Amino acid sequence: MVAVVVSSNILVQYPVQATIGGLDLADLLTWGAFTYPAAFLVTDLTNRRFGVAVARRVIVVGFLMAVVLSVALATPRIAIASATAFLVGQLLDVTVFDRLRRSGWWKAPFVGSLLGSATDTTVFFSLAFAGLFGFLGAADPFSAESATLLGTAGVEAARWVSWALADFSVKLAFAALFLVPYRLVMNLLWPIPDRMATAA
């Protein structure tokens, strides 16, 4: 968990420098969008195997360790934004997961990740880049530059707004893709006979 958060804190500061079909991906994505969704997979597997109390402890320990490492490796504003978003988003994911735990095997991890990701994205990008939170420290000047919103003609917004929307889209895709490893690892952590015995 710590490795996921720290690497994401560093990588969110680097836009994807590529162009696809005339669309500049630097206006849409940072590299952190591809590493952070793994945090929800770790939390959901912990929650499924050990329960909500242990999952919350993992989040708190991961949060504390990640704060220390992030302060050393990222700017203070990114570290504050990341820590706050991580804590709020992950705790929401655990709560939603716990409430849906007895529904279809895929609902708890998918809906928890969906709501946790939406919250995490909103909190992180607002705190990290919005002018409203300038008291937290200087933001990357590149993030505040005006650019076309998600590459659409005629709609202008601060570059970080497109980053947030594209980041959330990537998290949604990963929430769906991670259902496969979630199911596979879940079967290893909690074999079917154990589940049947618990249900009996």
Image: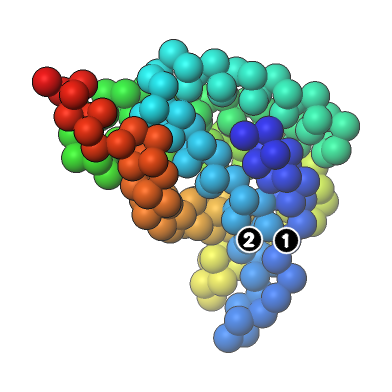
Q: Which residue is identified by label 2?
A: 29
Question: In the image as oriented, which residue stretches furthest toward the front?
Answer: 193
Identified by mark 2, the residue type is Leu
The numbered disc on residue 15 is: 1
The percent position of residue 147, horizontal first and vertical second, equals: 66, 65
Q: Quadrant of residue 188?
A: top left
Q: Which residue shows up at 73% across the image and 61% down it?
A: 15
Which corner quadrant holds the N terminus?
A: top right
Please report contact status of discs 1 and 2: CB closer than 8 Å, yes or no: yes
Residue 72 higher or lower than 50, as above or below = below
Identified by mark 1, the residue type is Pro
Mark pair 1, 2: CA separation = 6 Å
Residue 136 higher or lower than 53, as above or below = below
Q: Quadrant of residue 185?
A: top left
Q: How many marks?
A: 2
* Foreground of the two, 45 or 170: 45
Q: Which residue shows up at 70% across the image and 66% down it?
A: 16
